[in-house]
């Protein structure tokens, strides 16, 4: 049974019949660190015996016995008769462990190439890189200045603020873009109109004028 990997919670087995290899991922940036490929000499020797058996067949019974013995001795793809693969995994962990650092600030592991501030000796979450902090501060200041400059501009100079707004056309239901008429069907968008008799302002759709009582 392999020991747990302390410096990451995510790793994958890339081993095959020729040898052993694992990929270890940084828990923060997901960068991949691959262990050196380690030859599986036992499996290669077993394969050579199989080739000889196929070439010579029953003429070399000793080869057949050796091959069968090798097959029963260990199965690296699921069996646990030998600790060959577990030992290879332990070596892979030690080989890749040097690419990670344990932060004393937060107590978590981070990869040395992307998530570690070497000058401070902490992860970049506890001690961000100075240039990154400067760039972030500049971006924040730039955003604030843009908003301040925008507030100084008059964005409603050509907009009718006094007239009640209608966002959809009462006739066709299209969204309006401002103005007195619908851009899709030409319907008047004003919510009020003047009485044709007394000139009093009445709501569009009213049957009678509220001032003189005349039909609209």
Image (cartoon, rainbow, N blue to C red):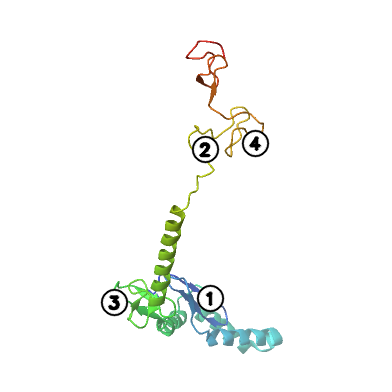
**Residue plotted at (64% across, 87% down):** 61
- Which residue was labeled with disc 2? 160
* Secondary structure found at label 3: loop
**Residue plotted at (54% across, 17% down):** 195
Sequence-earlier tag: 3 or 2? 3
Give the alpha-carbon distance from disc 1 to disc 2, as whole Å: 68 Å
Give the alpha-carbon distance from disc 3 to disc 2, as whole Å: 61 Å
Give the alpha-carbon distance from disc 4 to disc 2, as whole Å: 17 Å
* Secondary structure found at label 2: loop
- Which residue was labeled with disc 1? 14
Q: Residues within 10 Å of mark 1 (few under 14, many from 20)?
A: few
Depth check: give the residue in front, 56 or 190. Answer: 190
Give the alpha-carbon distance from disc 3 to disc 1, as whole Å: 32 Å
- Which residue was labeled with disc 4? 183
Disc number placed over residue 136 in the picture, else none: none
Task: Indicate left or right for 187 with 166 as reference.
Answer: right
* Secondary structure found at label 1: loop
**Residue 6 can be seen in this image:** no
Q: Which residue, as the protein is rendered here, is positioned at the far front?
A: 198
- Which residue was labeled with disc 3? 104
Where's residue 190, x and y in %? 56, 28
Give the alpha-carbon distance from disc 4 to disc 3, as whole Å: 65 Å
Q: Nearer the viewer, mark 3 or mark 2?
A: 2
Is the N terminus in the top left, top right, bottom left or bottom right quadrant? bottom left
Kindly check if marks 3 and 1 are in contact, taking CB atoms under 8 A apart as contact: no
């Amino acid at each position: 049974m392999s020991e747990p990997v302390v410096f990451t919670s995510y790793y994958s087995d890339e081993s095959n019949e020729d040898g052993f290899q694992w990929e270890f991922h940084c828990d923060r940036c997901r960068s991949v660190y691959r262990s050196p490929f380690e030859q599986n000499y036992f499996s290669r020797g077993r394969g050579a015996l199989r080739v000889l058996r196929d070439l010579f067949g029953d003429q070399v019974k000793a080869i057949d016995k050796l091959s069968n013995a090798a097959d029963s001795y260990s199965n690296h793809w699921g069996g646990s008769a030998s600790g060959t693969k577990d030992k290879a995994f332990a070596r892979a962990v030690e080989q890749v462990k040097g690419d990670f650092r344990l932060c004393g600030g937060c107590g978590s592991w981070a990869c040395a190439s992307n998530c570690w501030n070497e000058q401070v000796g902490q992860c970049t979450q506890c001690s961000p890189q100075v240039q990154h902090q400067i760039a972030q501060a500049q971006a924040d200041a730039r955003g604030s200045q843009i908003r301040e400059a925008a507030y100084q501009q008059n964005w409603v100079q050509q907009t009718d603020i006094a007239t009640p707004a209608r966002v959809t056309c009462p006739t066709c239901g299209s969204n309006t873009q401002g103005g007195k008429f619908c851009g899709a069907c030409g319907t008047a968008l004003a919510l009020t109109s003047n009485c044709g008799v007394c000139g009093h302002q009445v709501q569009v759709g009213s049957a009678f004028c509220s001032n003189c009582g005349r039909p609209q």
